[in-house]
Image: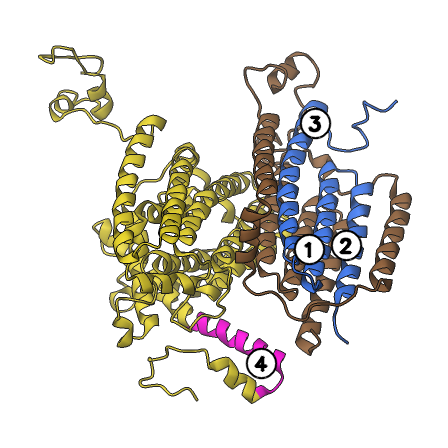
Amino acid sequence: MVIGLEEYLVVAAILFGIGLYIALSKRNAIAVLMGVELMLNSVNLTLVAFSRFSDTDVALSTQVFVMFIVATAAAEVAVGLALAMVVYRNRHTVSVDDIDLLKW
Amino acid sequence: MIPLAKWYDLRDLSGLSEEITGWIGADWLASLVSGLLGALGVLAVVGPTLLILIWVERKVIARFQQRYGPNRVGPKGLVQPVADALKLVLKEELRPRAADKYLFLLPPVLIFLPALLIWGVVPFGPNMQVADLNVGVLYLLAVSSTGVIAIFIAGWSSNNKYALFGAMRVVAMSISYEVPMVLALLTVVFFTGTMSLNGIVEWQQSEDLFLVLMLPMTAFMFFFSATAELNRTPLDISEAESEIVAGYHTEYSGMRFGLFYAVELLNTLAISAFIATFFLGGWWLWGLDEWVPPWIILLAKTGGVYFIFIWTRGTLPRLRIDQMMHFCWKFLVPVGLVFLVAAAVERTLLLENNWDASIALPVFGIINAGLTVVAVVTWAKLSGTESQKLPSNAIMARGRVGGLRAAQAIRVDELGAEPVAGGGD
Amino acid sequence: MSDVGFHLAFWSLSAITIGAALMVVVSRNLIHAVVFLILSFIGVAGLYLTLSAEFIAVVQILIYVGAIAVLMLFAIMLTPRAGRDNSETGMRLPALVLMGLIIAAGTFIGLETDWGSMRGEAIDNQARIIGESLINEFVLPFEVAAVLLTAALVGAIALAREDPEDGSLHYASLLEEGLISPDEPSDAAPLSGTPGGGD
C-alpha cells in the first residue's frame, strides 16, 4: 500500500480534533494556548502534505504560507502568554473559569 | 572494500552506502545500517577525543594559572580522565524525594541528543559527512536550541530554589545569545550563497581564502555567542560556584552529572569544529589535503579553536548577568545587523556586476576590517560599552591606600598642575 | 513512498505525534503536558521530513521547540501553582462531541475526495526556491509579517513588564490598596518546608 495524501490528512484531522478539545475544555489559560498550537501544527501538516503531492507549478508557495503561519503562531504565543501573565497579576488566577467580568 | 593507500587515508566515504546496500539488499535497511555506522563512526572519533580533551583542558588551564595540572595519576596525569569517569560511574545517583520522578530523569538524556546530533553535519572531508543536508546551518541552529529545554527541565524538576534560579539565568542567556549566533551564521550564508556546510568549505576552497579574513567581526560574534551557549567562562554563570552552588545540575550526582559534564565538552568540541568549518576553511588547507587526509586537517583546526576556548576560559574573568545581557542586546545585535547588511550589499555587488572575485574579495575584506573598527569604536562609545580609562600611574601611586577607587577619587584640577586629593588619600 | 522503511517511519511518527497529543490531554501535571507537547512538535517535524520538506522541518524544530515551548515553560513558572493541575472545565462533553464531529468530517473529506493527479517525487533545493518566492512574489506578506513580529515583541514587553513608576501594576501598590493580602503565596520558587518557610 502506498502512503499517499489521505493518510496525512487523516493524521492532521485527528491532531486538529485533539487540539480543539484541549482548547475548549482546559481550565488553565496556558493549556488553552497549547491546544491552539496543536491546531496550528495540524493545519501546517495539511498544507505541507498538499504541497508535496500537488502537481501544479506553485506547489512550493504552500510552504511559504506555512512559514507565515509559523511566524504568526510565534507572535501569537508571545502576546498570549504576556496577556496571561498580566491577567494573573491583576486577578491572581489563570483559570478561564474565573476570568468572567464581561459576562452578563 | 574501499581501496586505501594507507590506513588513515580515508577521504571518500560516498561509496560506502552503495556497498552496504549491496550487502544487505533492502534499501531502507541499508540506510538504517549506514546511519548507525555513521553514528558509531562519529562516536568512535569523538569519544576518545573527549577523554584526551579533559586532560588537555586541565593541564592547559593549570599552565595559564602557573601551576602544574593533574600529574599524579599515571605519567603526566594522562590517566586522570579515566579516573574521573570511573569515579562518576561508581558514585551513588541520588534523587531528591520531592523531585518530580520522571522529569528528574529526563534532562541528562535530553541534553545528550543535540550534542550527538550536531556531529551529523560536520564535514570531515569532501565526501565524509554523516548527512550533507541542504539546510545544514539551519539544522545546527535548530538542534542546538533544543538543549535549552533540557536545562530548564533540569532546574525545574530538582525542586531546589537555587537550581531554578541557575536554570532561569542560563536559559535567559542561551536564548539571548542565539540571536547574534543566528545573525553571524546568516552573514556567512549570505557570503557563500549556500546553507550546506560542505558547500561553505568548497566556497572557501574555490575563492582561495578563509572566511575569517573576510568577516572578522562575524567570527568574533559567533565565537562569543558560542561561549555563551556552551556556558564557558567568561559567560559561565551556570557554574559560578560561589554564587549558586552548581546551578541547574546541583541535585544531579554520579553518572547523571557525568553526562552533563560530558555534554559540555562534546558541545565545545562540536562548536570548535563548526568554527573551523565556517571561518577557517574546514578540511581544506591550500592544497595540503592532497597529502594529508582532510579529516586530520579538520581535527587539527578544531584543536586550535579549542585551545582558544581554553585560553579565554583561563584568562578572562566572569561577566555579571546584566553586563552579559547588555553586551548581547545592545552591542552584538546592532553590530551584527550592520555586518549582515554589509555582507548582503557586497554579495549583491559581486553578483550583479560580475566582478572578478580575486580582486573584489580582498577589497571587501579590507572594507569589512575597516567597518569592524569603525562600528565597534563608535557603537561602543554611543552605547556606553567602551573600556574604562584607568587613572595614570602617578595618581595610582598617590591613592595607594584603597587602590583603584582611591585613585579615581583623586581629582586633577583643570590646570593639571597639582592633583587635588579627594577622599581616601 | 511504498517501501517498508517509509511505512515504518510514517506510522511510528504518526503514533508518536498522536500519542503525545493524547497525553497532553490526559496528564495531570501541566509541565508534563508541555513536555508531551514538545514531543508532539518533534513528531510533526519528523512527518515533515517524510514529506521531504526539509526546510519546514528544521524551521519547526527551531521555532516551536526552541522558542515557543521555552516561552510556555517560562509562563507556567510565573503563574500560580494552583492552576498547574491541568484540570478541565465543565465543557468536557460538548468539546468531546465537537472533537468527534470534526475528526469524522476531516477524515471523511480526506478519504472520499478525489484529489486528482499527484506528484511523484519531491522538489529539490527547497530552501532556495522558498527564499526566492519570499523576496519576489511574497515580499509584501514578508514585510507585513516582519511588522507583525515587531509589534508582538514590543507589545509583549510592554504588557509584561512591571513598571515601577506606574503605580497601578506594582505589587507594593496593590498591597497598599488592600487588594491583596501580604501573606499571599508567591509561586516563583517551588519550595515548601525549607528552613525559613515557603515564600
* Image coords of residue C174 (percent x, y): 65, 16
Front one among B154 and B271? B271
Q: Is residue C39 above or below residue C166?
A: below
**Label 3 residue SS:** helix
Task: Select label 1 or label 4 by which is in front.
Answer: 4
Residue matched to label 1: C40
How busy is the neighbourhood of tag 4: few (under 14 within 10 Å), some, or many (20 plus)?
many
Q: Quadrant of residue B56?
A: bottom left
Q: Earlier in the sequence, mark 2 or mark 3?
A: 2
What segment is highlighted magenta in the picture?
A: B24-44
Nearer-the-camera pick, A92 or B354 = B354
Dot 3 amino acid type: Val
Circle 4 marks a residue in which chain?
B
- Give the residue at mark 3: A87
Q: Pointer 4: what residue?
A: B30
Which of these two is toward me, B36 or B282?
B282
Q: Position of residue B272 (x, y in %)?
A: 36, 58
CA gap between label 4 and label 2 equals 32 Å
Q: Find chain B in the image and tell me its colour.
A: yellow
Q: Residue type at mark 4?
A: Ala
Residue assigned mark 2:
A15
Q: Is B304 on the left or on the right of B41, as rendered? A: left
Q: Is residue B92 visible?
A: no
Q: Which chain's residue wears label 2? A: A
State the hue of chain C.
Answer: brown
For the residues labelled 4 and 3, say whether their Cβ atoms are less than 8 Å apart: no
In the image, what residue type sits under mark 2?
Leu
Considering only vertical position in the picture, is C153 above or below B144?
A: above
Tag 1's secondary structure? helix
Look at 30% across and 62% down and name the residue there: B301
